[in-house]
């Protein structure tokens, strides 16, 4: 159960905004939501108030709240489920936010000291930003990175993994838009310092016209998580496993990853979530279930599937390839 809702029947968030502050209202709200996540007031899987509810609470435009939710969803902090609401996502960037929250403690100490000399929150925010910019010696031409993958829940999960690993802004280019030569996407690719993709698309990208001469493309190999491989490996010969994806294409891709990882002693079938929702009784014939992360989030909400051996098919990026990626980024930044 949402702990916030348990202690606060109105499901209100402990957020305040200051229209006179130098920080945009949308940024104020977004940063406070991240702060609540960092310190556990909002936990993974917790529901956020509807946009209209939070807008009424803060006396803000509901479009502003919708924009904040959308931005935090794109960044991997929240996940939206159609007809269900918006929830704290179970992603690497959320886990990193929770694990690496020391800077919030330092800011709290700094603001406590600022209050002693009567500095307002708005003045503190402006001064902190100015100091950060001056001390960081921000680059006038920051590195431009583009990640190419299929525009699916799995593709977006990979995008958030890459973004969390490199710690820099990364533009997401959906594969459908790339092959359609969508103008905005192609402009991003042409102007990129480095194009990042997965091994599934690397060869196709290398032979694509319109990217410009000598465009550097770095490919990352995607693998199933250790938990998934452990579960699959421990199943007996000819055991039946079902992989459930948001659609059949996603489920088939996850099955292919399992095969490429060397899992061949079990019988693996695939299904889309919609099929399972229509025929849940079919699950009884399988020894183990495996579902993508977005499917698991929907199952948590609906509580429609109960199986003793359900594992989330999490993805991981090859650590050696990540080392190469980070080394290339460091080299490009120093050149």
Image (tube, rainbow, N blue to C red):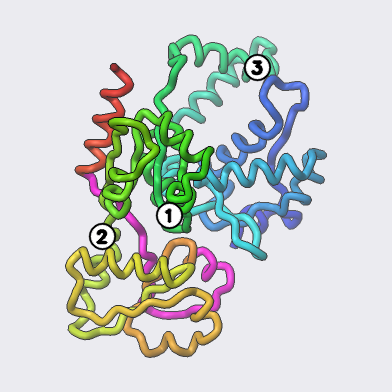
Q: Which mark is residue 26?
A: none
Residue closer to the observer: 294 or 206: 206
Position of the N terminus by quadrant: bottom right
Verify whether residue 78 appears in magenta. no
Residue at left offset 57%, top offset 16%? 128
> Image check: 286 left or right of 44?
left
Q: Is residue 90 visible?
A: no
Secondary element type, mark 1: loop
Q: Which mark is residue 115?
A: 3
Residue at left offset 69%, top offset 20%? 22
x, y (%) of residue 29?
66, 36
Q: Which residues are magenta?
A: 297-319
Q: Is residue 142 visible?
A: yes
Image label count: 3
Position of the C terminus by quadrant: top left
Q: Earlier in the sequence, mark 3 or mark 2?
A: 3
Residue designated by label 2: 226
**How crowded is the residue under tag 1: few (<14 C-alpha within 10 Å), some, or many (20+)?**
many
């Amino acid at each position: 159960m949402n702990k916030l809702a348990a202690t606060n029947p109105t499901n209100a968030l402990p957020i305040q905004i200051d229209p006179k502050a130098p920080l945009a209202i949308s940024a104020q709200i977004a940063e406070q939501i991240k702060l609540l996540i960092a310190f556990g007031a909002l936990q993974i899987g917790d529901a956020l108030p509807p946009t209209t509810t939070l807008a009424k609470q803060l006396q803000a435009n509901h479009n502003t709240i919708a924009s904040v939710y959308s931005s935090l969803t794109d960044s991997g902090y929240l996940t939206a489920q159609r007809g269900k609401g918006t929830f704290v996502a179970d992603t690497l960037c959320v886990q990193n936010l929770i694990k690496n929250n020391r800077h919030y403690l330092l800011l709290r100490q700094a603001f406590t000291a600022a209050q002693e000399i009567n500095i307002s929150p708005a003045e503190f925010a402006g001064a902190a930003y100015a100091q950060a910019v001056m001390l960081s010696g921000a680059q006038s031409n920051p590195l431009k990175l583009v990640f190419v993958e299929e525009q699916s829940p799995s593709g977006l999960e990979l995008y958030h993994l890459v973004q969390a690993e490199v710690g820099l802004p990364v533009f997401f280019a959906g594969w459908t838009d790339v092959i359609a030569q969508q103008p905005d996407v192609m402009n991003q690719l042409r102007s990129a310092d480095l194009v990042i993709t997965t091994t599934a698309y690397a060869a196709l990208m290398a032979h694509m016209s319109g990217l410009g001469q000598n465009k550097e493309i770095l490919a990352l190999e995607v693998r199933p998580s250790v938990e998934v491989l452990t579960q699959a490996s421990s199943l007996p010969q000819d055991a039946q496993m079902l992989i459930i994806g948001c659609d059949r294409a996603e489920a088939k891709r996850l099955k292919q990853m399992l095969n490429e990882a060397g899992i061949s002693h079990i019988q693996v079938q695939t299904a889309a979530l919609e099929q399972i929702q229509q025929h849940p009784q079919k699950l009884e014939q399988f020894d183990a279930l495996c579902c993508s992360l977005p499917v698991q989030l929907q199952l948590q909400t609906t509580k429609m599937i109960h199986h003793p051996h359900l594992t989330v098919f999490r993805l991981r990026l090859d650590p050696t390839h990540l080392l190469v990626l980070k080394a290339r980024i460091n080299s490009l930044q120093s050149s």
